[in-house]
Amino acid sequence: MGKVRIDFRVNGSAHSVDSYPMARLLDVLRGQIGLTGTKEGCGEGECGACSVLLNGELVNSCLVPVLQVAGCEILTVEGLAENGRLHPLQQAFAETGGAQCGICTPGMILAARQLLDRFPHPTDQQIRIGLAGNLCRCTGYQKIFDAVRRAATIGSG
Amino acid sequence: MFQTVGKPVPRKEGRQKVTGESKYVDDISFPGMLHGVTVRSPLPRGRIRNIEFAGDLPWHEFTIVTAQDIPGENYVALIVDDQPYLAAEFVNHAEEPVLLLAHPDKYLVEKARCAVHLDIEPLPPIFTIEASLAKEQIVWGTDNVLKTFTVEKGAVDDVWADAAHIVEGEYRTGAQEQLYIEPNGIIAIANPEEGITIWGSMQCPYYIHKALLKPFQLPPEKIRVIQMETGGAFGGKEEYPSILAGHAALLAWKSGKPVKMIYDRAEDMAATTKRHPSRTRIRAAVSPEGKLLGLDIEFVIDGGAYATLSSVVLSRGTIHAAGPYNCPNVRIRSKAVATNAPPHGAFRGFGAPQSIFALERHMNKVARVLGIAPEEFRRRNFLHTGETTATGQTIREAIDLEALLDRALELSDYHAKTKAFAKENERSRVKKGIGFSSFMHGAGFTGSGERYLESIAGVEATADGRARILVSSTEIGQGTNTILAQIAAETLGIDYDCVDLAQPDTSEVPNSGPTVASRTCMVVGKLVESAAIGLKQTLVNAGLLEENNFAEACARYIAEFGPLKSFRQYQAPPGIFWDDETYRGDAYGAFAWAVYVAEVSVDTLTYEIKVNDFVALQEIGRVIHPVLAAGQIEGGVAQGIGYAVFENVVWKDGRMANSQMTNYIMPTSVDVPDIRVYFAENPYAYGPLGAKGIGELPMDGPAPAVLNAIENAIGVAVNEIPLMPEMLMEDLRVEAAVG
């Protein structure tokens, strides 16, 4: 099957890409749109490094064929800061030590963003379960939990 | 008293990491770039008979590299030059690289990889320490032995006759995958005129630099290695990137085009290094008063098919094998042996987690035989200031391990929980337990290692009063950029925000040594501190530096004399001596000391093991950055818990059968307990502003603490990790059968 034109929005901007319909959203974002903040860690939907929000839902972009996002709204890590001002989650991850090597961080922040959308003041257990699809090998997760708690405070303050 | 040190200043590259702006190797590309892949041996041992290019593919479009295409010598320079970049005739492990392919289309090159058929005549392989020791096949050298060490203290042969108790045990640890979330990756541009430039994910730019000299027959100035932002490493990007960089450079050399090679997860897990599996046998002689009289330890690690770093992993494991105990008579005999597994390599802890697991399980066993509490047995045998380690190193620092132990037990509510669990467990299907480990970890290269390295670090000042640190030490998540900037800022008396770091690029920065061995803070940090002092002294000697005029002084100095740079080279602290022949002396400049306490529950129906609480108390000298330091401990503890009860490398015919994140399970956010981190600060006289090493320490203690807790919970001693539920089920069945 040849390439097809697919229209969707990324971080509020309209994009029209010519792509194989089964191309991974991850590759289209990184290779065709040039948004390299979304990372590949495993390519099989286990690590969550490629997490993005698709119409507000957290998905592994390595498992999403680009065909499926026609007409959809995608949010990547590049779309979080506004006019150079960090999103409360980005600020909290930077301050609490939630980012070490940084490779899981974009996906982790998007998972946290969706968690806080659902539970603006999450319990510790909700944080743990909400982030369970995103692996981090550096932090042992403790500082990530701190970051989410702090962002919840900033967000409501 | 400090302006910057001890404060949670923002991570230098933190903003770029949380916005997605940081550039990792796979985030950059070059015009005309090709994508490279590796064709690997499916067999663990054999002779290559033929290579067939099958399938309906435009083979003429591909750049194809075999061993014959290597312009110079075909080995990866490390310690022993035994590992080829590409197998020429024989393969010695599964996944051994045989052939390289490159093509502009990364999907087509993947198809082509599958279409190359290697015809290999099988030779009989060996896969276990026992098979290697028994020389069932000779797969390396004349006897399969990659390295041996013997450490002797006192006269261990004389203690057995008079010992009140002699306790023996055998302990095993499995392989473990580093599982950095960013797989290995390199981009190379290479041609005979301009030489080679490498961009990549790595710990040690100068290791790659050295490794490329011989295969390409180039002078050092024609090789340039640049570290990109690196998405975790843990030892897994210490030596392996030298191979990958060589491969990318070979493809680039032959094609004349930039070549990118990024491993996918399965390839990274199956083909790159893992932690060495080990077997430790311990025989302990104990006096009637519960004092250790003698320790006879045999420590063996499986090095895999080539020597790589096994000799130094073995060294660290050997030196740590007798732990933080004052034992007058010790013999440690150790061996690294070859098998037909892919070479095992560096992983946080570097041999120490293996031998410490054995000893800390054995200490509990001896205590049980003696009928005393495990904490009491440790107390009777702890090292004190002025006493000597197994290598005869006199502890000069003021240490108080009894106090460390007492505090850790108090913080974890150990005594009350021990009692409460014993009572609760009588009526409960889920058994709870609590256990601990006490241990030490030496910072910096072992023995004479730092003297041989002769590391250099520099600090440069600019006319606007900013300082720039010049080191090849890499930021791999652990905080190199931040802590070195703190040390420089503190020493120069300037703001933390006024300190920058040069990107590690061998054409710009001196060789400050590899980013390994918990040496970056203690050793490189000290060099940065010394270089900063030198820079200040230059300004003072020029009559320019007064109070609070650093920027002005720099501007005037540079206007008058030119560039302002200060470099320092490593010098051993006074009174440090090591004998490589006898393996005696001061093994490390300083040790970090720790007591870790784990609380677990074991479901006796499902055999599920959960770690419910974790206390990590350590003394690492001065804490430079409290948040980063705690982050190091928490991350190490999580990896250690994984090592103990989650992470099982399944081997099938010498290949990793579960090379996916789907079936090799590392701890997730729901698997880790609250990890409660505490520091006891005891500034070290020869560390930068009093700091020692920290990175590897937290990998050493969790596994024995968790297994000690499991024994406390179920009353069954398990002496092998990883302990998976199905293995525990088997152990409990055996226990029930034999009563």
Image: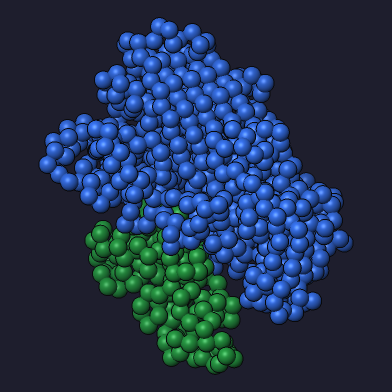
Chain colours: A green, B blue
> Which percent across, then down, holds residue A138?
46, 53
Residue at image x 34%, y 49%?
B726
Residue B350 horizontal side relative to residue B135, left or right: left
Between A39 and B568, the one nearer to me in the picture: A39
Between B629 and B200, the one nearer to me in the picture: B200
Residue A85 horizontal side relative to residue B86, left or right: left
For the view shown, which residue lies furthest in the bottom direction? Answer: A5
> Which percent across, then down, holds residue B4?
48, 45
Residue at image x 68%, y 30%?
B451
Q: Is residue B641 visible?
A: no
- Quarter-of-image position of residue B703: top left
Between B510 and B535, the one nearer to me in the picture: B510
> Which percent across, then down, holds residue B82?
73, 43
Q: How many marks?
A: 0
Between A57 and B531, the one nearer to me in the picture: A57
Residue at image x 51%, y 41%?
B277
Q: Is residue B726 above or below residue B372?
A: below
> Which percent across, then down, holds residue B497?
53, 54
Residue B482 horizontal side relative to residue B613, left or right: right
Q: Is residue A27 visible?
A: yes
- Quarter-of-image position of residue B392: top right
Q: Quadrant of the C terminus of chain A?
A: bottom left
Residue B26 horizontal side relative to residue B429, left or right: right
Q: Is residue B249 above or below residue A17?
A: above
